[in-house]
Image (cartoon, rainbow, N blue to C red):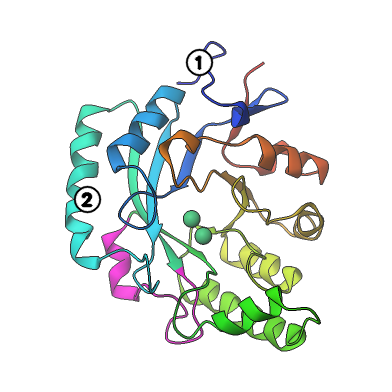
Amino acid sequence: MITKNTKIKFSGYEYEGYRMIWDIHTHTTYSHGKGTIEENVNAALALGLEEIAITDHGPGHLTYGIDKALIPEMRAEIDRLQALHPEIRIRLGVEANVTAVGNHLDIAPKEFADYDYVHAGYHYGIRNGNCMKNFMNWSLPGNLWGKELLLANTEMTVAALYENNIKILTHPGDKGPFDMHALAKACEETDTLMEISTWHSHLTEDELLICKKYDVKFVISSDAHVPGRVGDAAVAIKRAFKAGIDPERIVNIKKFK
Ligand SMILES: [Zn+2]
Ligand SMILES: [Zn+2]
C-alpha cells in the first residue's frame, strides 16, 4: 500500500497530496515499450500501487502491434509474477486500435477472453483508420479535411464503444479531430472510463470542461513506455483540477496528506 513515507521516484508522482493508486495503462517490449513485464511490475511495487496492467498495443498496429502468438507467454509471465507478489493485482489488458471496419477494433469479439480487460484508443499506423488523412490534416496548414475527419473519427470511435465492452477510452481527442460531446455521451451510456493521460495532452483542459458535463468517470494513466514512468500522475491530476473535475470522479487517485 502507498503510505506517506513511500519513496517518490520521480517528480510526477503527486499533486496537491493526491497520488495514483493503480496504473492500468502501461506498455512493454511486447509492443514498443522499453521495459519487460517484470520491470513494470517492480516499478509498481516500489510505488505501492494496488494494481498494474500491461496493455500493449493491439495487433492491428502495422509496426508495433502485439504478436498474438505471444499472448500465452505474456499470460504465463503475469501468472508467475502474481504468484510472487500477492500484494498487487497484475492484469493483462490490451490497448486496442479503433478502426472503421468490423467491430471497430483490431481485437475481435472472440479474442476479448484473452485479456482481463480491453482499452481502446485511436492511433496512427493502422489499416482502415484514416491515419494518413488525419496525419496530413494535423501536420499541414489549413485544416484540409477537418469537418469530414471529425465526423469519421467520431463515428468509428462511438461505434467501437457501443459494440464492445471497453474499460478505458484512451487519450480521447488525440491524433485527429473528434466531437468530444459525442465521445463523452457514448462513454456515459456505455460506462467507459475516460482517460486523462500524463503522456498525451488529451484530454486537454478544454476537453475536460466538455466531458465533465456528462455523467462519466475519469481515470489517470501514465501510458508508461518505460518502467520509470509507471505511476506518473501529477500533470494529469493538475489538468483535471484546473478544469474543475471533482476528485471523486477520478477512480484511481487518493489523497495521502
Ligand atoms: Zn495510445
Ligand atoms: Zn498506450
Q: Position of residue 109 (x, y in %)?
A: 34, 75
Q: Residue at x 34, y 45 (%)?
A: 91
**Residue 53 place in picture, x, y as percent:** 39, 45
Q: Is residue 104 magenta?
A: yes
Indicate the position of residue 36 as horizontal and vertical percent values: 30, 42
Say which residue label 2 marks: 75
**Is residue 218 among what the camera can see?**
yes
Taking the image as shown, residue 83 lies to the left or right of residue 55, namely left
Is residue 195 rendered magenta in the image? Answer: no
Q: Is residue 142 above or below residue 184?
A: below
Residue drawn at point x = 51 percent, y = 35 percent: 231
Q: Give the left or right position of residue 125, taking residue 157 as reference.
A: left
Foreground residue, 103 or 59?
A: 59
User: Would you name the residue on which mark 1 appears?
Assistant: 6
Q: Quadrant of the C terminus?
A: top right
Give the extent of the magenta segment: 97-115
